């Protein structure tokens, strides 16, 4: 019985807390990646420049700061058409999906993760992100229904109270 109750409370906590498994990135890591990009711009190979830009993009879309996430999205969208490698496209689509998820644009995130899965259908990271996004969409729908039901209940209650006072 205690195990069932513990499981129930964990489920409720995950529902309201998000229960997501996407890592966060702090400002120090972003600053390090920015230094790496600046150093790579000074004569390094094109491959090294692209790798450092991808690491910076990863750090930005995993940031807790909305402006960092938006910057990461902009960098990734700019570079998306520049690379024809399916592996690089997959990575960029995945990071864009993370960025849009962090920006609360769940529909766009789901669309991008599905494009990513078209390239690599069995990629576990993308499958996990898709589940997180779909769970969030469902959670927001349940919360929206709850808010609507509460509002309707308050309106009906107010009307019933007004009618009862009148009589």
Image: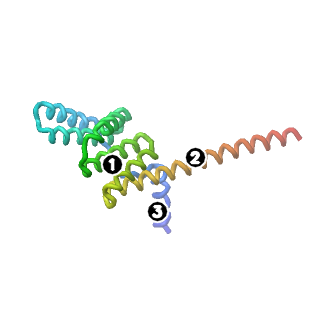
* Residue lying farthest to the right in this orientation: 167
Please name the residue shown 44% across and 42% down the image.
104
Measured Cα–Cα span from mark 2 to mark 3: 25 Å
Please name the residue shown 60% across and 49% down the image.
145
Q: Above or below — where is 146 with respect to 10? A: above
Location of residue 64 by image quarter: top left
Percent of width and height locating residue 69: 35, 37
Percent of width and height locating residue 52: 19, 39
Q: Above or below — where is 123 with respect to 105? A: below
Determine whether, in the image, residue 144 is placed left or right of residue 120. right
Please tell me which of labels 1 and 2 falls first in the chain.
1
Please tell me which of labels 3 and 1 falls first in the chain.
3
On the image, numbered disc 3 is attached to which residue?
7
On the image, numbered disc 2 is attached to which residue?
144
Q: Secondary structure at mark 3?
A: helix
Please tell me which of labels 2 and 3 falls first in the chain.
3
Determine whether, in the image, residue 145 is placed left or right of residue 106. right
Q: Secondary structure at mark 2?
A: helix
Determine which of the numbered discs, if any, sits on residue 94 in the image. 1
């Amino acid at each position: 019985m205690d195990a069932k109750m513990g499981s129930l409370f964990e489920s409720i906590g995950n529902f309201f807390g998000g229960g997501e498994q996407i890592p966060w990135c702090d400002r120090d890591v972003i600053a390090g990646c920015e230094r790496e990009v600046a150093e790579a711009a000074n004569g390094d190979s094109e491959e090294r420049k692209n790798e450092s830009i991808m690491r910076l993009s990863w750090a930005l879309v995993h940031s807790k700061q909305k402006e960092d996430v938006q910057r990461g999205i902009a960098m990734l969208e700019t570079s998306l058409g520049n690379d024809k490698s399916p592996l690089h496209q997959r990575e960029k689509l995945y990071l864009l999906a993370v960025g849009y998820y962090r920006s609360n644009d769940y529909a766009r995130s789901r669309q991008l993760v599905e494009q990513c899965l078209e390239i690599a259908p069995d990629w576990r990271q993308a499958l996990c992100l898709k589940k997180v996004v779909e769970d969030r969409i469902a959670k927001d729908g349940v919360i929206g229904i709850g808010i609507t039901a509460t509002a309707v209940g308050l309106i009906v209650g107010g009307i019933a109270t007004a009618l009862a006072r009148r009589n």
